[in-house]
Image (cartoon, helix red, strand yellow):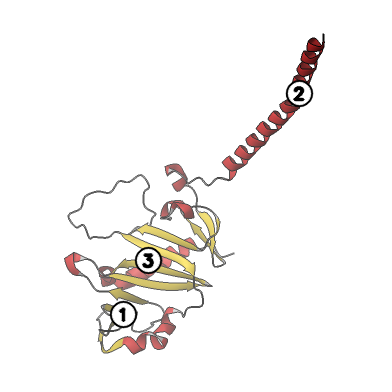
Amino acid sequence: MATAHGAYRSHRVGRARANLRLPLVVSLALALLAVGYVAFVLWPRWPGADGLNAAALPITVAGELFNVPPAAIRLPTQRHAGPQERLDLAFLWPSLSPPDPTAKPSLSDEPNALDRLFVTIAAADGTLPPVERINAIFRRYLADERFESPDGLTIISFRDGTPYQGEDLYLDSAAPEKFLTRCTRPGAGGTPGMCLYEQRIGAASLTVRFPREWLADWRGLARAIDRLIAGLRPPAG
């Protein structure tokens, strides 16, 4: 009789524990589902080909607003709206359109030929504007000789043994503040020289990188860069 009573008590205790565990299991399952849903919603997802062709993203860098085509953004982690520390962009030349995300690279007889213009947007961080650097920094490293091209471009080389050895400074003879770029010289093996052109937009510094050979039509290049920058900015309200 005692054995039967003990078995009955054990059965009741087991059922009670099972009844207590059931709500706990259900609550845990619901919590896991909730966490999974939140993770799914908040987890960053990089846009596919359709997303890259979507409308421009509103992105702020150093407090300045830019409307950026997703396909022009080179790094997937930067393809989202909102504030960012830096943007790395690429545009086809001379159309200035974003690269086709579905296009595959093709073989070329000129492997060093470049057809893209690269743009970096970051905070200026208190650095001097390009024109002010001529007197404050560059002048001590520039050679005394300068060349005035027939199309109104002044070219000054940096001296050997300086931090800018192997580079040249190109500027608009009439208005250096309108066009000023620093370029490396072509290297061995057909490596093209590259130029850096910088423009300030508020607290943001916008740096454009392009092949030195494009300076053959530097006025057209300057106009194209101005159009590109204007296209990245929101309409004046």
* Residue at x 32% of width, y 46% of height: 103
Local secondary structure at mark 3? helix
In this rendering, would 81 be left or right of 8? left
In this rendering, would 167 be left or right of 130? left
- Above or below 36: residue 218: below
Residue corresponding to mark 3: 224
* Viewer-side residue, 119 vs 43: 43
Q: Nearer the viewer, mark 1 or mark 3?
A: 1
Residue corresponding to mark 1: 164
Going by the numbered disc 1, the residue's amino acid type is Tyr
In the rendered image, residue 31, in percent from the top left (x then y), is placed at 67, 36
Q: Nearer the viewer, mark 2 or mark 1?
A: 2
Question: Where, quadrant-wise, is the C terminus in this rendering?
Answer: bottom right
In the rendered image, residue 6, in percent from the top left (x then y), is placed at 79, 15
Q: Mark 3 and mark 1 in contact (Cβ < 8 Å)?
A: no
The answer to whether residue 154 is visible is yes
Question: Where, quadrant-wise, is the N terminus in this rendering?
Answer: top right
Direction front: furthest residue: 2
In this rendering, would 196 be left or right of 66? left
User: Label for residue 19?
Assistant: 2
Tell me the distance, in whole angstroms, between the alpha carbons under discs 1 and 3. 27 Å
Residue 2: image quadrant is top right
In this rendering, would 168 be left or right of 39? left
Local secondary structure at mark 1? loop
Going by the numbered disc 2, the residue's amino acid type is Asn
Tell me the distance, in whole angstroms, between the alpha carbons under discs 2 and 1. 78 Å
